Amino acid sequence: MMLSRSPLIFLLSIFTVQVSATTIVISPGVGFDDATLSSSIPNQQGNNPGTTLGEMRMNLFQEAAQVWADILNSNVDITVAALFEDKFCDANSATLGSAGATSSWADFGAGDAGVAYHVALAESLKNSNMNATSVEISAQFNSKVDSDPVCLGGGGFYYGLDGNAPAGTTALFPVVLHELGHGLGFTSISDVQPGGSGKFVGAGGYPDAYSRNLHDLDVGTSWDSMSDAERLASALNEPALVWKGARATADRSLHLGAAPELVINSPGGIAGTFEALLGDEPTIIIPVGGVTANVIDGNNFGDGCSQINEGSFNGKIILFDKSDSCMSATPAFFSEFATNAVGVIIADTTGTGLPDMSGQISNQEITIPYVGVTKSVADDLRANIASANVTIGLSTSKLNGENQGMVKMYAPAAFEQGSSVSHWSRTASPDLLMEPVQGTLEYADVDLTAAAFDDIGWSVNIPGGVLEVIFKDGFE
């Protein structure tokens, strides 16, 4: 996710995926030589034919490379240096991977003057190699997921090539696909972290091809026309920070569903329609007309993270604060199956926007809608709880993850290093590959990212087709 210029030592052979669109070369490092037998970790193997962990990793990278190679056009090889190393991980969260372009280029006789391009895109536009023997993308993935019994419950990465990760495992394929997306250009080359300069830090100090598609609706201008101070503020300005690129804007309805919303019906003093963020469970049902009910304050009965044994919630919508002790699906699960509630509202407690609604409960089909709302909306409901009646429904005029007809970017009020600005907003649904936290994704679907790559200058093909796989230097 961060621009990297660090040299890497490559320990194994070179693997190439070649198609008419482009050639992607995987230069594998530490972790691709792991001799652990795949037969000893069958829950992680799925349909991956590799006989060792290292081979399974290479096969999975092959699949991810195939996806991008078939979408993007370049006559210049794109080399990816990939390895596994220890990164942060505990029982509930982890840094799964990171990747970035190793350099950027400007005024190189192709593309637009005064614009910095990530190196793989620059070489495609120039139609020539520009960085000698250097790799175009550097990528690192968390070895602890497979080696640490505490990390994410000890289930390990799922290396299957079918998108059917068993409960307790973490699917690696969408992580690799996501990180390669960053290395290919889905990231801002700017210093907009708190205390930063606000300047562009790519080649020549010019606006990069990605960032000039960022537009702030509050300021009314795009990042390449802002002052440094305006850019710093805009990096914290969700939902006003949007993608202005024409192709992604035109294609947004192909990938985004109707936006969830919370309508406060009564009392009249707080009535209105408010933005809401839908939970990740794919089995949620929101009927035509939505779900309407009176609201009960669930905080009177606990945080929703454990069995609820008090209160009569039948036919009610329960309001909980977002707890650090569990994911948002947990109170929805208990509310549906222990209390017969018809819906759940999860309130942000920080005052910075919508709460984290990511995460799913394995082997459970939560059908009642549960949505996240801002702290101010929840405060109004609690102040009027005796007469609060709401509807959880779907908008008839707005897509999930757009603002004023453009796709929202991830720009929370509390800056997140490596995530802010360089991802779609987490409000998008169905989930998009380039969101900062991945939920339910269609296997091998890069969704709106291909359109964004068209906006930054890539020649883009419609996904599909057959790839020719070529092995080099003895890798089998």
Image (tube, grey):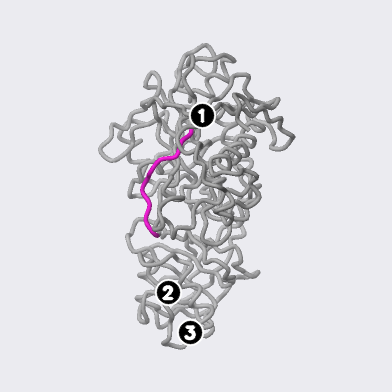
> Circle 3: is it few (<14), some (14-19), or many (20+) Cα within 10 Å?
many
- Of marks 2 and 3, which one's residue comes earlier in the chain? 3
The structure residue drawn at horizontal position 45% and vertical position 73%, both measured from the top left corner, is 331
- Of marks 1 and 2, which one's residue comes earlier in the chain? 1
The structure residue drawn at horizontal position 56% and vertical position 15%, both measured from the top left corner, is 126
Distance from the alpha carbon under mark 1 to that under mark 3 = 60 Å
Amino acid on which disc 3 is placed: Phe
Rendering coords of residue 164 (x, y %): 62, 55
Between disc 1 and disc 2, the foreground one is 1
Residue 315 quadrant: bottom right
Amino acid on which disc 1 is placed: Leu
Q: Are marks 1 and 2 in contact (CB under 8 Å)?
A: no
* Residue indicated by mark 1: 12
Q: Nearer the viewer, residue 328 or 398?
A: 328
- The number of numbered badges drawn on the structure is 3
Please state, as top left, top right, bottom left or bottom right, where the N terminus lies in the image.
top left
**Looking at this rendering, what residue extends furthest in the left direction?**
195
Name the chief secondary structure element in magenta. Answer: loop
* Residue indicated by mark 2: 319
Q: Which residues are magenta?
A: 82-91
Residue 444 as seen in the image, left or right of residue 129: right
Residue 22 as seen in the image, left or right of residue 380: right
Residue 254 as seen in the image, left or right of residue 180: right
Q: Nearer the viewer, residue 254 or 48?
A: 48
Distance from the alpha carbon under mark 2 to that under mark 3 = 11 Å
* Residue indicated by mark 3: 313
**Looking at this rendering, what residue extends furthest in the right direction?**
466
- Of marks 1 and 3, which one's residue comes earlier in the chain? 1
Amino acid on which disc 2 is placed: Leu
Rendering coords of residue 46 (x, y %): 63, 52
